[in-house]
Amino acid sequence: MTNDRASFGSRLGVILAAAGSAVGLGNIWRFPYMTGENGGAAFILVYIGCVLLFGAPIMMAEFAIGRRARSNTARAFRTLAPDTKWNWVGRMEVLAGFLILSYYAVVAGWTLQYIVEAAAGNFSASAPGNYVESYNAFISNPWVPVLWTVLFLLGTHLIVVKGVEKGIERSSKVMMPMLFILLVVLAVCSLSLPGAGRGVEFLLKPDFSKVDGDVLLAAMGQAFFSLSLGMGCMCTYASYFKPDTDLPKTAFSVSVVDTLVAILSGLVIFPAAFSVDIRPDSGPGLLFVTLPNVFHQAFGGVPLVAGVLGVMFYILLALAALTSTISLHEVVTAYLHEEFSLSRRKAAGLVTAGCVVLGTFCSLSLGVGKDYTLFGMTLFDLFDYVTAKLMLPVSAFFVSVFMGWYLDRRIVCDELTNSGTIRLRVCRLVVFLLKFVAPIGIAFVFANELELI
């Protein structure tokens, strides 16, 4: 432990940085789509319950581990559990962060291309049927997506290399408010369209007939992945928290911000899509095929409006992606910086270089390299599968077990209450959730993702 370790300068910086880590592309398309397909408001209620029962307690656990050890994720477990195998949980989280950053940057780079497309007026000039063809031609291009991937990684690098307070915290204080402002403006524009009410109904009208075991598992999975749990981000950021940071309140604030962004995203997407009789699809198609069509049909008669709103939306996506890539980059940078005594600049450079190489191959695997597969999957799909369906749930499971069963309860409550200075009557409840509820829930999510149940 070092006494001069960097730290966030303010409580607002802590919340915005942690929320920025949680908020990403998944909030913009995955949450609204899953909400619509799984009972609307009923799914939202189930999701909120999962956040409270599973997500928030595990986030508190990662916060407590990181702040207690005041070190990178791998060393944190080694510090709190010396001479054990627990350090491998931290190492797995670092590796997961590195792999996710490598392929996530590919999709993040696509947002830059679409900002250019929108600014050039292509959303109002192209025929609606051409968007799928344009999207496929773009991702299959051997060099343009790679260029955007590299540029996005370089932008992430420039922020991370500046350090915690001047880089991560300062950028979060600018980008997160911008993200909220853009969401609100776009939601107002979307809600003002003719027929937008059908989209609001699709998003918010409860349909409890669709709530079953699959919906519960889907909500739990969304809670874990949306809150950036199991990839070392929250643990690493918590190592920069000050001793008086209120961990439960911070976890609650991050959960609220993350959920609010997801719901606002639904109010942007569904009303606009339904106003032009387009039923939203999932995945990249929603962001890069359906929405340009929405802008074309809804505002094609006013090219300037279509262009401005298109630029605003893809800037929103870029900001959401950037706040996530910063946290993922920091996980690996902190690890190399502390474990191998590298300067921060050199550690960040190695992370960026490694991600550029892997990101290039991931990008090419969607186009010229799509015929080269491993286990029947392209490299891009393989990275996504291994991290989202294997590494993250396993890491989150062991984090909850570590806090619930391994660490002394006095240490856990000491961190959650800041040595008794914060009144937290539910400390025993949090420990109970980490001991029993969260591990069982994660086990079911893991089994469901692997189609074992």
Image (cartoon, rainbow, N blue to C red):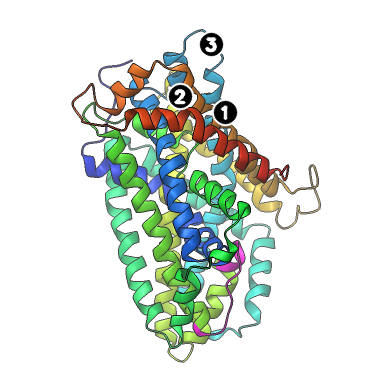
Q: Secondary structure at mark 2?
A: helix
Distance of label 3 from label 2 (alpha carbons)? 17 Å
Residue hosting label 3: 84
| Percent x, y of residue 186 | 37, 73
Q: Is residue 150 above or below residue 299?
A: above
For the magenta stretch, what is the residue range?
A: 275-286
Please tell me whether residue 331 belongs to the stretch shown in magenta: no
| Percent x, y of residue 31 | 50, 59
Q: Is residue 382 above or below residue 417?
A: below
| Percent x, y of residue 423 | 21, 31
Question: Disc 3 vs disc 1: Cβ atoms closer than 8 Å?
Answer: no
Q: Nearer the viewer, residue 220 or 269?
A: 220
Numbered label attached to residue 228: none
The mark that comes first in sequence, 1 or 2, is 1
Q: Nearer the viewer, residue 98 or 17?
A: 17
Residue hosting label 2: 404
> For this view, does 418 lie left or right of residue 295?
left
The three-letter code of the residue at mark 3 reads Thr
Question: Disc 1 vs disc 2: Cβ atoms closer than 8 Å?
Answer: no
Residue 331 in view of the camera: yes
Q: Residues within 10 Å of mark 3 (few under 14, many from 20)?
A: few
Q: Is residue 290 above or below residue 383?
A: below
Badge nearest the viewer, 3 or 2 = 2
Distance of label 3 from label 1 (alpha carbons)? 15 Å
Residue 354 in view of the camera: no
Numbered label attached to residue 92: 1
The three-letter code of the residue at mark 2 reads Gly
Tell me which corner region of the image, top left, top right, bottom left or bottom right, holds residue 193.
bottom left
The three-letter code of the residue at mark 1 reads Met
Residue at 39% x, 43% y is 158
> For this view, does 168 lie left or right of residue 402?
left
